[in-house]
Amino acid sequence: MLTTTAPPVPVLLAIASAGRGPVLEQTLRQIAGLADRPDEVWLSVPAEEVSDPDALAAEFGALLPMPLRVLSGPRGLCAQRNAVLEAASEEAVVLFLDDDFLLGDGSVTALRDLFIARPDVVMATGRVIADGIGGPGFDHARGLALLRRPDGEGLAPIYNAYGCNMALRMATAGHHGVRFDTELPLYGWLEDVDFSRAIARHGEIVRCDGLWGVHLGTKKGRSRGVPLGYSQIANPIYLIRKGTMSPRRALRLMVRNVMANTGRALWPEPWIDRVGRLRGNLTALVDLLSGRLSPTRILDL
């Protein structure tokens, strides 16, 4: 009997990073120690920070047992991720990780198996077994201590992928021209929701428990208080108008953030600029009333 096997699916692990070289280096060292490895690792960095991409590729490539490629271009999470999408092969599954996400062993094989077995799946996000984003964050040593494989291999539909770890079928993104929206500048808050809902028009988005890891939630290099507070209002409203976020979800998110910033402004967490975020919220609300509201306004704040 003649038998056939599905062709292998290359998994390209891509990290967009800016201003966090030491964090990135430690994350690459953790990737190098995986038994279950991606086929390639790509870094997308701002050209203003990297004068010689080849030299950076040689420096960081020495840490890895798989090929490393460095892309450079305009600064901003969306622009840096788009550089990957423009260069990647349509045969690949692109796994975007934050530079402070520690990937669990077995995740790459789980992704390959998922995208072969389920041609209807266009995007997947993994199980975050510990997330430092809601607190002061974890250092790499703590993250590695928390990196223990979870029980279960569940698969469930989900509204959007979580930006710290999300894999997409490059054939779908390429064929339909789905890209990250550079009108969400710098840190690109809610870019994961926007991209997810855009690509969801062409297939299913799932949470795959076989893809897993720890998000350190490193605070260095993230948006300052005022711009982030502005984005907490401007970006959801922009996505409502664009049609990639439901009004109910957006309103709930905005109210929750404004209430949190107001309630904690006098007694803020040491790692959060609540006063700055509240100022950004109020500035955005004034701009909404005056008709000036735009996500790109954070470039002037």
Image (cartoon, rainbow, N blue to C red):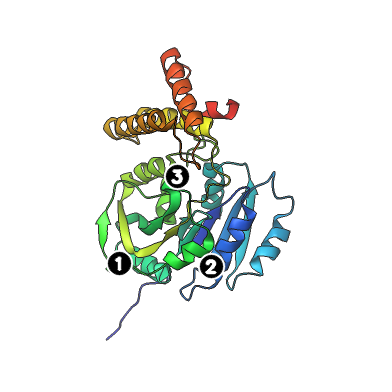
Quadrant, the N terminus: bottom left
Query: In this rendering, does residue 164 appear at all?
Result: no
Q: What residue is shown at x 41% (from left), y 33% (from top)?
A: 264
- Which quarter of the figure has residue 68? bottom right
Question: Of the residues shown, which amino acid type is indicated by label 1?
Answer: Ala
**Residue 177, labelled with which disc?**
3
Q: Which residue is mark 2?
A: 30
Q: Nearer the viewer, mark 2 or mark 3?
A: 2
Determine crowd level at label 2: few under 14, some 14-19, many 20+ residues with C-alpha closer than 10 A: some
Q: Which residue is mark 1?
A: 117
Determine crowd level at label 3: few under 14, some 14-19, many 20+ residues with C-alpha closer than 10 A: some
Determine crowd level at label 1: few under 14, some 14-19, many 20+ residues with C-alpha closer than 10 A: few
Q: Which element type, helix, strand or loop, lies under badge 1?
A: helix
Quadrant, the C terminus: top right
Number of numbered discs on residues: 3
Looking at the image, tell me whether mark 2 or mark 3 is earlier in sequence order: 2
